Image: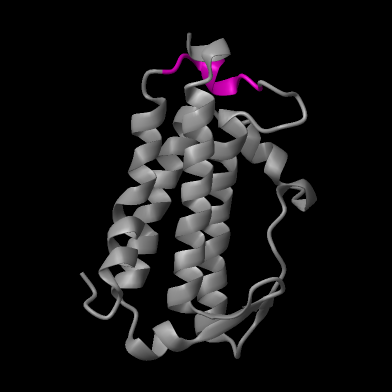
Amino acid sequence: MNPIIPLSISDRLKTQHLALATITFHLSAEQLIYKPVQEKWGIRENMAHLAKYQILFSERIDKILTSDTPNFEPYRAENDKQFEKWVQKSPETLLGEINFDRKFLNEKFESLTETDLQKAGIHSTFGKLNVSVWTEFFLLHEAHHLFTIFKLAHTVSISG
């Protein structure tokens, strides 16, 4: 454990994503791909977003650490030409990729220094965020999608 990273951040970074398996383990393949509203994401789209966004977050942290206060636009899956490729992956593959990539993300954070944590990037909506605050933002964003998946997993029309 890196003692300079707040425990509330390091613990969630290590474990929060594990809720995904707990939330989805009892669901059938049909439930995992079901979309209650065609224009909205179902569980698989949310999982694809979590997998893709985790990689994007890691890349953004790398850029913050190696650049002088880089600028970032909000990630929008609808503008990502590669997102459909992610959606086509099986939920099991997505879960495996999230878990695999999180190991490397945690290793990255274990090596950060106090100076690294204070480096910042500029988010076009939220302004200047240092690595610690950017990580909090990532974790809250991930939690939002985990809660969305939880709600979808417990929708009567697919689980009842």
Judge from the rendering whether residue 72 lies leftward or rightward of residue 133; answer left or right.
Answer: right
Instruction: In this rendered view, identify the residue nearer to me: 145 or 73.
Output: 145
Residue 115, compared with residue 52, is above or below; it is: below
Question: At which x and y percent is residue 45?
Answer: 62, 35
Identify the residue at horizontal 48%, vertical 13% (top origin).
159
Q: How is the image coloured?
A: one colour
Question: At which x and y percent is residue 53?
Answer: 57, 54
Identify the residue at horizontal 30%, vertical 75% (top origin).
5
Query: Does the magenta-highlighted stretch encompass residue 92?
Result: no
Query: Does the magenta-highlighted stretch encompass residue 29?
Result: yes
Q: Quadrant of residue 25?
A: top left
Identify the residue at horizontal 34%, vertical 88% (top origin).
114
Residue 137, compared with residue 142, is above or below; it is: below
The total number of labels drawn is: 0
Judge from the rendering whether residue 10 lies leftward or rightward of residue 127; answer left or right.
Answer: left
Question: At which x and y percent is residue 157?
Answer: 57, 11
Query: Quick one: quadrant of the N terminus?
Result: bottom left
Judge from the rendering whether residue 89 lies leftward or rightward of residue 99; answer left or right.
Answer: right
Identify the residue at horizontal 41%, vertical 26% (top origin).
24
Q: Quadrant of residue 67?
A: bottom right
Question: At which x and y percent is residue 86?
Answer: 62, 39
**Range of residues picked out in magenta:** 27-35
Residue 84, compared with residue 5, is above or below; it is: above
Residue 83, compared with residue 63, is above or below; it is: above
Residue at the far top: name it.
Answer: 160
